[in-house]
Image: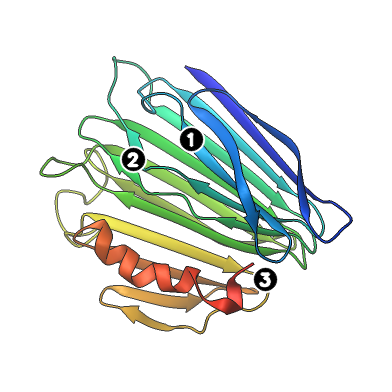
Amino acid sequence: MRASATVVAEADGRGGTRLAVLRGESPLLLRRTGPRGAGGTTVHLVGGAAGPLRGDDLRLDIEVGPGAVLEMLSVAASLALPGRPGPPSRLTVTATVAAGGTLRWLPEPLIAAAGCDHIAVTRVDVADGGTLLWRDDLVCGRHDEPSGAVRADTTIRYAGATLYRHELAVGPGAPGWDGAAVLGGGRAVGTLVAAGSGLPEPGVAGPNAAVMPLAGPGVLATAVGADIREVRAALDPLCRRPAIAS
């Protein structure tokens, strides 16, 4: 299956945000679900079909204009499934944030079901003066099953310079997966990148969690846990901080 979705958020000239484009194809269905404080708007990603399945090629493009505030959520976790023999499933997410714009990407976790083979590619470009909060959580397998294979490749740029570049591979075939080199025996991992103004202070966010400065106007928070509850306990409070809320 090949599918794409596009969101374009613009300032409406009255202190609010309008969606100039909101277009999606199953399983990437998009729904505007209401306003978000400070003149913003909220869009939920709705899974219109099972997957991603092996062989699926999905793409989501997000554009936030000057003065616009957009929060992207999802109604449920995304479940990467094995499907029929074929190439890995792939989800490519690209986002641009203009000066004065704000994007908060806070979807539910990706679950790597046993037997899946999935690639997640993220490319985010934030202009000088833009604000970003980008959250990605991964759960290695459903309850009492081994993890499938997931490779996540993330690059976030701010003011034309690379702020965050990270690759993570879990499941069969991932280097060090049979030992403790990847997640140290953890079954869930979460990352939160904040860029722009009003950043949280670096420090310890809980057991197996930390907030670290990046080489630019940004911070990285990361947490590893036995399950997603431990990751959420560490990262959710950072998402609610008034200093980085819309």
Give the answer, above or below, for where 121 lies relative to 3.
below
Q: Looking at the rendering, which quadrant does residue 117 occupy?
A: top left
Q: How far apart are the two marked residues, 3 and 2, measured between alpha carbons?
A: 29 Å
Q: For this rendering, which residue is in front, 120 or 107? A: 107
- Identify the residue under disc 1: 46
Nearer the camera: disc 3 or disc 1: 1
Residue 179 screen position, x and y as percent: 14, 55
Residue nearest the viewer, comparing 182 with 98:
98
Secondary structure at numbered mark 2 = strand
> What's under tag 3, amino acid-wise?
Gly
For label 1, the SS is strand
Residue in the picture at 33% in, 64% down:
232
* Image side of residue 152 versus residue 180, left or right: right
Between 3 and 46, the one lying in front of the other is 46
Of residues 216 and 43, the one nearer the viewer is: 43
The image position of residue 97, as x and y in percent, is 72, 54
Residue 231 visible? The answer is yes
Residue hosting label 2: 150
In the picture, measured across the screen, residue 146 lies left or right of residue 211, that is left
Q: Earlier in the sequence, mark 1 or mark 2?
A: 1
Q: CA distance from mark 1 to mark 2?
A: 21 Å
Q: Secondary structure at mark 3?
A: loop
Q: Mark 2 belongs to which amino acid?
A: Val
Q: From the image, tell me which residue sits under label 3.
A: 196
Using the image, determine if residue 58 lies above or below residue 1. below
Q: Quadrant of residue 86?
A: top left
Earlier in the chain: of badge 3 and badge 1, it is: 1
